[in-house]
Image: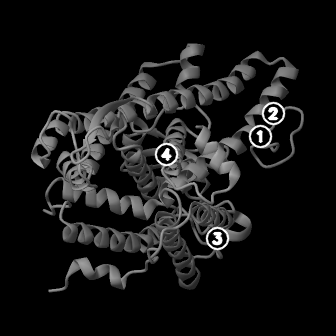
Amino acid sequence: MFDLSKLNKYLIAVEKPIYKVSLNNKLLWTGIVLTIYFLFSSQLFGHVYGVSKGAGQQFKSLEVLLGSSFGTLMTLGIGPMVTASIILQLLVGSKIIDWDLNEPEQKEKFEAIQKLASIVLCFVEAFAFVVGGAVPPQTKDIFTTTIVILQLAAGGLLVLLLDEIVSKWGIGSGISLFIAAGVINRIFVGLFTPFTATGTLPATGNPPAGIFWAFVYNLMAKNLQNILVNLLPMISTIVVFLMVVYAQGISIDIPLSFSSMRGFGRRWSLKLFYTSNIPVILTAALLANLQLFGGITSKSTIDNPNLKCGILGCFSQTSSGGSQPVSGIMYFLTAPTNLLFDVISGLLTSQLALRALTYMAFMIACSIIFSVFWVSTSGMDAESVADQLTSIGLQIPGYRSSPQIIRQVLDKYIPPLAVLGGASIGLLAAFADFTGALGTGTGILLMVTIIYSIYEQLKTENLEGAHPFIRKMLEES
């Protein structure tokens, strides 16, 4: 029988460095990957042959969550990788596949199967996007359709390789990097783009789409209602940013000491967001896949050509070319993004309140589930951590230096933190989405946690030989 742990040898991969990569080189590789990502996600360099420019506008709202750009080689974004992770997390976490990921051999099998599933899903999702109409070819002949599918799949494989380059040669992970880059780009464009929603220059009665310029325009026109409409997203973005930064600092400190050297030790911080932003990434990706499936499987109604209905609900075409659910399952699993404005202006209805509650409940429940599964499948459970601490000679003061003893102590913290942290980050993401913040509330939450994680990783790096500006910034922080 074929040994699954050896599957990695036959899959596309980036070799691990055989030497310690310097911080300068890590930053260089990260910058190169980001440059490639932005180039191929632009219509100028990454436009897919055989597809009309502007294709996939109805799914524009999903680009932040998938780190993608519809109609370009980055159309699939991180979708295949995250979907593969979700499927395997559920299968292993529910013991349908009974693998002990604390065992190196079985962990290797898990990683190999995850990569294989990601590669397969690149082709499956590319086929679904093209045939389902998310990114339709200009002509429906077999040749053009096949070429478009292969281009989208190739883009997905490129993202997979870029993620490996960042993970092995750069800072952080490619998945997180692409999400953060997409959110930052979306916030900057949403604030400062000088063009209108249709891409034309602003004129009387047709203000720029950039919220900052629209705010200035309405301020000069003394249009109080539109001033409030423009001001709320900017204030909400700042408030959500500060809330996430504050929540990121909540932690429990556990004292550790070296068993062989008395008087030497450290404090280990167990953060409230113990599993970081992973639960929200997986939950957001699940929602994005559901919305994509709902949009692809829906069909236009006879009475209203701008309304498409399917098994997950009905979707209405917006003036900007996008789509939004107006009824059915997806309607109640999508955040009412202008809820804060509706509350202030007295437009809140019982249906909107119910929609907000169902969306919040879904985000919290899924974040808890994925947080618990991630702890058990990524070596963050109490048993794995206890073994790691013991292997480097650390112990908890006042307790014997035994993995079993340390595990019993950590069991008081890690499982509750997995649940509480998952619930907290799910609640925070849902609340942030209700504010109508630029880049979406979930996007800002992911961006802040990703940047904070990269910052923490940078602080652990050897600063010898680093650029003076970077060294000064990290040493003073």
**For numbered disc 2, what is the local secondary structure?**
helix
Give whichever of discs 4 and 2 has the lower sequence position. 2
How packed mark 4 is, by other alpha carbons closer than 10 Å (few <14, some 14-19, many 20 or more), is few
Question: Could you say which disc has been placed on residue 456 in the image?
Answer: 4
Is residue 362 something one can see in this rendering? no
Q: Are marks 1 and 4 in contact (CB under 8 Å)?
A: no
Residue linked to disc 3: 51
Task: Kindly report which numbered mark, 3 or 2, lies closer to the viewer in this rendering.
Answer: 2
Q: Residue at x 84, y 17 (%)?
A: 222
Question: Quadrant of the rendered structure where residue 363 is?
Answer: top left
Q: Which residue is drawn at 32% across and 32% down?
A: 253
**For numbered disc 4, what is the local secondary structure?**
helix
Give whichever of discs 1 and 2 has the lower sequence position. 1
Question: Quadrant of the rendered structure where residue 474 is?
Answer: top right
Q: Do the residues labelled 1 and 2 touch (CB within 8 Å)?
A: yes
Q: Is residue 305 above or below residue 359?
A: below
Residue linked to disc 1: 192
**For numbered disc 1, what is the local secondary structure?**
helix
